[in-house]
Amino acid sequence: MGKNILIVDDSPTLRASVRFALSETGYSIHQAENGKLGLQKLAEIHTAGDRIHLIITDVNMPEMNGLEFLRQLKDENSRFRFIPVVVLTTEREETLKQKGREYGAAGWMTKPFKADLLINVVRKFIR
Amino acid sequence: MIDQNIEKLKEIFKGEVDELIENAEETLVSLEQDVHNTELINEIFRIFHSIKGSAGLVGFDAMARYAHEVESVLDRVRQGELQVSKNLISQILDSIDLIKSFIEFHFGSASLDDARLKKSEASLARFLGAGEMTKLQPPAGAPRRVPSGGWKHFGIHLELSDQAFFRGQDPLLLIQELADLGEMVSVRANTAGIPLIADLDPHVNYLTYDVVLKTLRDRASVEDVFLFVRDEGNITVADISERYEDGIDRELADKKIGEILVDEGLVDEGLVEQIAASHRKIGEEIIDQAEVSEEQVSEVLDRKQKSKKVQIASSLRVRTDKLDKLINLIGEMVISVARISLVATESQNKDVINSLTELDRISRELQEQIMMIRMVPLESTFKRFFRVVRDLATTQHKVVNLHISGEETELDKTMIEQITDPLKHMIRNSIDHGVETPEARLAAGKPEAGSIWLKAFQEEGNVVIVVEDDGHGMDPDKIYKKAVEKGLVNKKRNAITDEEIFTYVFLPGFSTAEKVTEISGRGVGMDVVKKNVEALKGRIEVKSTLGKGSTFKIKIPLTIAIIDGMQIRIGSRTFVIPLDAIIEAFQVSSLDLKSIKGSRDLVNLRGNVYPLIKLHEYFGAGEIEAEQFQNGIVVLVESTFKKFCIYVDEILGIHQAVIKNLQTNYRSIPGIIGASLNGDGTISLIMDIPGIERIMQV
């Protein structure tokens, strides 16, 4: 069965570059523009009987930012609790990173990224 | 990414930036009317943040750098460090224009106005304050490094945070990723952390892993696997290439099978110790106790064998005499260091003393390591005996199986050469005098085939070799009768214990064989065996149960070149008594001493009476200091036949003696093995306890 990745970022360029970077892996890439839409997308896919195997999210987004998205995902009652989340952001600040980790982020990547590095990162969570 | 994708990506980028700029201009206009609206400030910040990120993605680095500077200024506004002023708004509008010209430069034919860019950057810098201009860091996550320097082996300990599952970090995937880097030599999960099922939370990670990876990559590439987990767990990557050759652990050959099984978490340490204490074969015993499967044990044995081969393949032949010279030199160095240490202690110079302590430690370690070079396993010696047993059993019309164990035990090469003949003789004796004919065995209710066990193991710094048979054992009465006939004893039978009687077989000229056979009982008796063992500073013991069998136990020091001893003073001379012969040392009072006319002095120790030997006269060490004698110190030693006490004037301490042969420089002295140099340059003579037992006719 194919593996699904959800990329949550307000920048279409970023979303496209992730899509291109992962095009060779054969994974299906789903997209959302912010955290709120990301949660909707997740619900949609899971209701349809499929599931997301990895989420890649930005931090700075309108409507619902990445940290809030992460917090809601990892909430005790969330059914998406055990989906690994990699934060992909230009933020390099340690305290923010620490916060992400506390909220349950599995990894932290900085933009801009190299395609092969992203593939390596994805491979840490799905095969 | 392929070019086509890059072109597509650039198109998407252009669309994004156009939209963002349009947004930015609108937001700025609103902001001008409502300078305190944080939402608007955040919005404009986010726009430049996005431009920066996306520009970096498509490789427009200069543009990304510029957007970063604008973002930094806006960040100060966001933090309340800068006010939204007319000035600032014109600056941002100017920046928007610059972003536009970047786009025209990348997508149109316009050239970039460098002077204008510099001017804008300088003005942005003013908003930031001097020195606060931050540069965009180089992209993180450099690609994996290129291979260098051939195959490497890494020992990886992987201990993820107990929250790993919650974060979606799967140790299996990390291990699979490691496997992608090369070849997995071993992967072991440590299950010790798993709690009882009642306390188990399936969402908590309890396991840790140890992996050995053979790879062409460097350490950094291996560490990259743990990019996200290395900060929170306990993960170590150690280069252990020296230990491994082509995926084979060199050290495995030196380890006992039990040790390996414990190391690899297959069995419990306690069980191995228990089995080791019983001197049974670990491998078989563990399989018997259903701890591990036979396949697992044979797999470990197979790896051990391979390790041995690697060891041999990478070994170097060195002439023994060269090695001996080295050992001698090191021995002298150890003594020299001890001598300097003595001088240094007197000088009370702390720095000198400290560095000498270090030097002392190193030189001792060096000595130990060099002694190790001489150690070889008993295996080839032991295996030779299969043939000996078969040949002899056949001529005697007996069926005898030889069982060997502990053949991996190592011993000094010279000692192995010297122990081979005595062992051969003991085995022959066992077949000859011990194991019965098949008929006799069946009649005695024993299996038709007799067994001889040849075992070796290390015990308290000694190598112990045991020759055991399940024959008819020794008859103490028969031995006593023979000893009396030969005039070897004059004591009454009931005055001697069976154990003591058994030691008579070591007396010169003693043979219990009813008829002289082809091999044993032809003059070369157990006395020769004993002498050979004693020449190696070893001891031999015998135990026997009539009808059940006999056990001969040889105990020899690991090496003959160094001996641990107690340094004592007798009169004016210092001596060393080998530590393994000493049972205890104590002060006697006149109450414990008994002098019997015409006989020797005796010491009563907790109800046991031992002969007391005074060596002053024999060694020409002057008179016993009379008034001290009543409160003198005696050292209780154990020799082949008896335990006895040696009177000493003073105990000086523990002494590690490098044995110097007296014969080469002087002549052999009965009762003395050799000499050893003391730290102060004087000499101690090392006592030969069995020799003293003979000379003093204890």
Image (tube, helix red, strand yellow):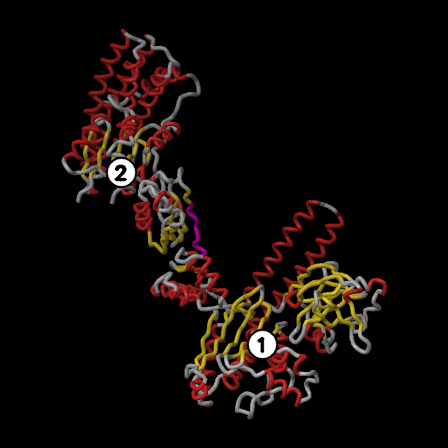
Say which chain tag 1 marks. Answer: B
Quarter of the picture containing the N terminus of chain B is: top left
Residue B532 spot, x, y in % from top left: 61, 78
> In the picture shown, does residue B307 fall above or below A58?
below
Is residue B531 visible from the viewing direction of this image? no
Say which chain tag 2 marks. Answer: A
> In the picture shown, does residue A22 fall above or below B356?
above
> In front here: B5 or A93?
A93
> In the picture shown, does residue B292 fall above or below B539?
above
Q: Amino acid at mark 1?
A: Val
Q: Label 1 crowding class (10 Å Cα cut-off): few <14, some 14-19, many 20+?
A: some
Residue A115 - label: 2
Pointers 1 and 2 in contact (C-beta within 8 Å): no
Is residue B241 in the magenta section?
yes
Q: Quadrant of residue B675?
A: bottom right
- Could you tell whether B464 is left or right of B629 in the image? left
Q: CA distance from mark 1 to mark 2?
A: 76 Å
The magenta-colored residue range is B236-243
- Numbered marks: total: 2
Q: Label 2 crowding class (10 Å Cα cut-off): few <14, some 14-19, many 20+?
A: some
| Residue ranking furthest to the bottom | B515
Residue A80 spot, x, y in % from top left: 24, 34
Q: Amino acid at mark 2?
A: Ala
Q: Residue at x 43, y 54 (%)?
A: B241
Residue assigned mark 1:
B542
- Could you tell whether B444 is left or right of A23 in the image? right
Is residue B308 visible from the viewing direction of this image? yes
Q: Residue at x 48, y 76 (%)?
A: B453
Q: Residue at x 42, y 16 (%)?
A: B129
> In front here: B561 or A1?
A1
- Could you tell whether A7 is left or right of B229 in the image? left
